[in-house]
Image: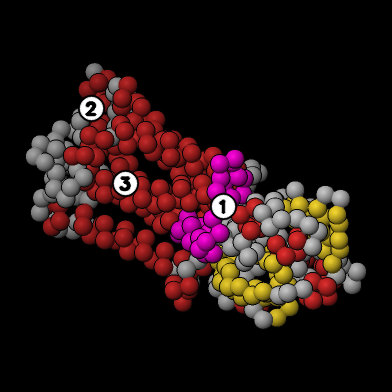
Amino acid sequence: MQKLDGQKITEALAAKFASPTRSTRLTVVLGRWLGITFTICFFTGLFSHGLQNPPSWMFFPTSPVWIYQLTQGLHVTAGIAAIPLLLAKLWSVYPELLTWPPVKSFVHGLERASIALFIASSLLQLTTGLINTYKWYPWPFPFRETHYWLAWVIWGSLLLHVAVKLPAIAAHWRRRSPKGLAVGRPAAKDPDTSGVDPSSDAAATDPGRWSRRGFLAAVAAATGVVVVTTAGQSFSWLAPASLFAPRKMGTGPQGVPVNRTAADAKVTKLAKSPTWVLMVRSGSSSLSFTLEELRAMPQHSHELPIACVEGWSQMATWRGVRVQDLIAVVGAPAGSELRFTSLEPEGAYRTMNMPAEYTRDEKTLVALELNGSVLDLDHGYPARIIAPGRPGVLQTKWLHSVEVL
């Protein structure tokens, strides 16, 4: 009797939520798009995390100079694109989540567990990731570490879900599903409830309802809109359409956006002090350089982007002393690993270690000027680090010391 009641409930729900736009084919198409965005996010996120918390095998590319600008721009843009895609995919399958009994077999239970884990972690990841682009943290947990481990949870649950659903994915991967696998035939094996063959003309012409093709077009349009109106913070060719991005190119002091101001860092007085010097140490050798002495050294200019983990970036002209020239004065080779310390009294990025790949690169500078004028205080006056292919949080501002490790 209970089994019969559960079957009636399932049939009633199938009738209630029946729609030509709900089908395995639709879910597979949306899943394909979503899988692409999540894959981009996962691997670009691993690259960014590796640059900030490098494992022993990590490589540090300095060419092209815009490599981090590209990868992190793709990371944030793909994450934003995933939001409408995930919502559309949830809409396409949510009637199946209400079927009875909730678990029919071990494989079915595994499938539902993977779906629950994937949905919960994805919604949390995308929501907190979007809020992070606005540098707002209304939660008690550390964002970066949570974001990193959630990525592994999502990736693992996604792979598990794909493995369990592989037969259905393979059967509906092409434009037309094979006979006998149409939606609603049979309901116990096929989770779709629309009762319409997604490859038939009825699915596209049912009066008063959206066709599957129309729904996919709407999802594609929505995804395109959110991408075009936000990706301009990362890609200059989209900058004119960047209506909703938290940062816009060409804004801020000297035409470059700022995340952390001197006032936020509590360095205004120290940075403006006439007694400021840059300490350079290598073993027992130690020298101090005034701003005038740094300006008297050979100066070099390079076009380098400042690219932040929140997704925004800006190409700019930086001028200053090559790091390898500076440490050569204390007898250190160009391939030395360095530690930079900021004037900031506290903060996770007060000190920064720089691997040898950046020290060897002639474009890595102790920058004194930006876009043809003296560094603005909010950009790191009197001196800051700028290196090719580095996250912005590692481009230490308000330099206090350089130590050869």
Q: CA separation, marks 3 and 2?
A: 28 Å
Asked where in the image residue 201 lies, by quadrant, the reply is: bottom left
SS under mark 1: loop
Q: Earlier in the sequence, mark 1 or mark 3?
A: 3
Q: CA separation, marks 1 and 3?
A: 33 Å
SS under mark 2: helix
Viewer can see residue 268:
yes
User: Given the image, on which type of amino acid does mark 3 rest?
Assistant: Gly
Highlighted range, magenta: 50-77
Q: Is 159 in front, or is 28?
A: 159
Residue labelled with disc 1: 60
Q: Nearer the viewer, mark 1 or mark 3?
A: 1
Considering only vertical position in the picture, is 346 above or below 361? above
Residue 302 placement, left or right of 19: right
User: Given the image, on which type of amino acid does mark 1 rest?
Assistant: Phe
At a point 45% along the width and 40% down the height, the residue shown is 154
User: Given the image, on which type of amino acid does mark 2 rest?
Assistant: Gln
Q: Earlier in the sequence, mark 1 or mark 2?
A: 2
Q: Earlier in the sequence, mark 3 or mark 2?
A: 2
Image quadrant containing the N terminus: top left
User: Does 74 appear in magenta?
Assistant: yes
Residue labelled with disc 2: 7
Asked where in the image residue 345 lies, by quadrant, the reply is: bottom right
Tell me the tag on residue 122.
none
At a point 20% along the width and 29% down the height, the residue shown is 188
